Amino acid sequence: MMTHMSPWLIALVAFSLVFASLGCLAALLYVLRALSVRSVKGARAPEQAGIDPDTLAVIAAAAYATLGAPIRIHRVHAHADEADESWGQAGRMDIMVSHQVGPK
């Protein structure tokens, strides 16, 4: 003989499982956030990156002016790409072509 569960009991079990899962997910996110805050507290300013302290100050001031809140710089990466040079060359070529005198 098979017993049938009442719809109210099924709904109660389903909601209980959903809320228990959400509680576990919230606890996991809280723990991960606490761990990331702890690891950030031990970080130092990017002095080893080879960036001039004046440049770091300018970056921090620009971020403060943009965000309106104090910031902490964790990492600075000086990006040197060959594409930067090609953009400059293309710009110079545009200027040179625009100044050429055509046949009359």
Image (tube, rainbow, N blue to C red):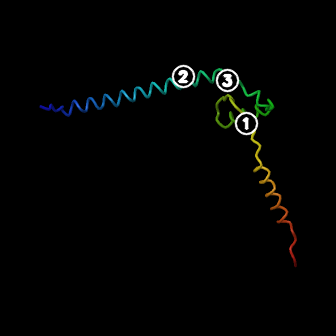
Residue positioned 32% across, 29% down in the render:
17
Mark 3, secondary structure of its residue: loop
Where 99 falls versus 38 (above or below)?
below
Q: Where does the image place residue 83, in percent across and percent down from the top left?
A: 75, 50
Q: Which mark is residue 47?
A: none
Q: Where does the image place residue 41, in percent across and percent down from the top left?
A: 63, 21
Q: Nearer the viewer, residue 5 or 69?
A: 5
Q: Are marks 2 and 3 in contact (CB under 8 Å)?
A: no
Q: Indicate the amino acid at tag 2.
A: Ala
Residue positioned 77% across, 43% down in the render:
80
Disc 2 versus disc 3: distance between alpha carbons?
15 Å
| Residue receiving disc 1 | 77
Does label 1 or label 3 sit earlier along the sequence? 3
Does label 2 or label 3 sit earlier along the sequence? 2
Q: Nearer the viewer, residue 100 or 46?
A: 46
Q: Nearer the viewer, residue 21 or 71?
A: 21
Residue positioned 76% across, 34% down in the render:
58
Q: Which mark is residue 34?
A: 2
Does label 1 or label 2 sit earlier along the sequence? 2
Q: Where does the image place residue 53, in percent across and percent down from the top left?
A: 79, 29
Q: Indicate the amino acid at tag 3.
A: Ala
| Residue receiving disc 3 | 43
Mark 2, secondary structure of its residue: helix
Disc 1 versus disc 3: distance between alpha carbons?
16 Å
Q: Indicate the amino acid at tag 1.
A: His
Mark 1, secondary structure of its residue: loop
